[in-house]
Image (tube, rainbow, N blue to C red):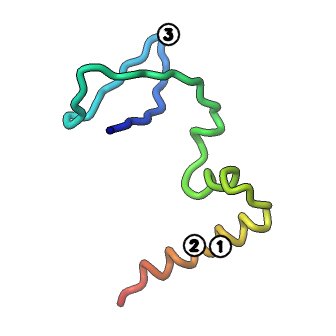
């Protein structure tokens, strides 16, 4: 099953959803939920903090570890 999640701006109580060319379906289910503006600004691992129930100290340790690992990936071998 293919699923598409998009955050779309509503203009004049209307919205338009463009599906990818490889999306094949004759009937779809559309569920519309309001999005908290703060949610749209969160990126990367910042989204994980609430989902993992981390304390601020645990989150900072986790974030530091992720940065170190990314730096290792970028090293020339």
CA gap between label 3 and label 2 equals 41 Å
Q: Which mark is residue 53?
A: none
Which residue is the site of mark 3? 13
Say which element carries label 3. Answer: loop
Residue 39: x, y in percent?
A: 62, 39
Q: Residue at x 43, y 78 (%)?
A: 73
Task: Say if 47 sits above or below 22 in the image.
Answer: below
Quick check: 58 left or right of 72? right
Q: Residues within 10 Å of mark 2 (few under 14, many from 20)?
A: few
Q: Residue at x 48, y 22 (%)?
A: 31
Do the CB atoms of the residues marked 2 and 1 lie less than 8 Å apart?
Answer: yes
Which residue is the site of mark 2? 67
Residue 17: x, y in percent?
A: 35, 24
Say which element carries label 1. Answer: helix
Quarter where residue 4 is shown: top left
CA gap between label 3 and label 1 equals 43 Å
Residue 37: x, y in percent?
A: 63, 33
Which residue is the site of mark 1? 64
Task: Say if 73 sits above or below 4 in the image.
Answer: below
Task: Say if 56 sits above or below 77 in the image.
Answer: above
CA gap between label 2 and label 1 equals 5 Å
Say which element carries label 2. Answer: helix
Do the CB atoms of the residues marked 3 and 2 lie less than 8 Å apart?
Answer: no
């Amino acid at each position: 099953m293919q699923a598409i999640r998009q955050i779309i701006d509503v203009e004049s109580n209307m919205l338009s959803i463009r599906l990818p060319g490889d999306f094949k379906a004759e009937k779809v289910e559309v569920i519309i939920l309001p999005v908290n503006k703060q949610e749209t600004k969160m990126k990367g691992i910042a989204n994980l903090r609430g989902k993992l129930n981390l304390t601020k100290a645990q989150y900072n340790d986790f974030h530091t570890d992720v940065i170190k690992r990314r730096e290792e990936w970028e090293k020339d071998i």
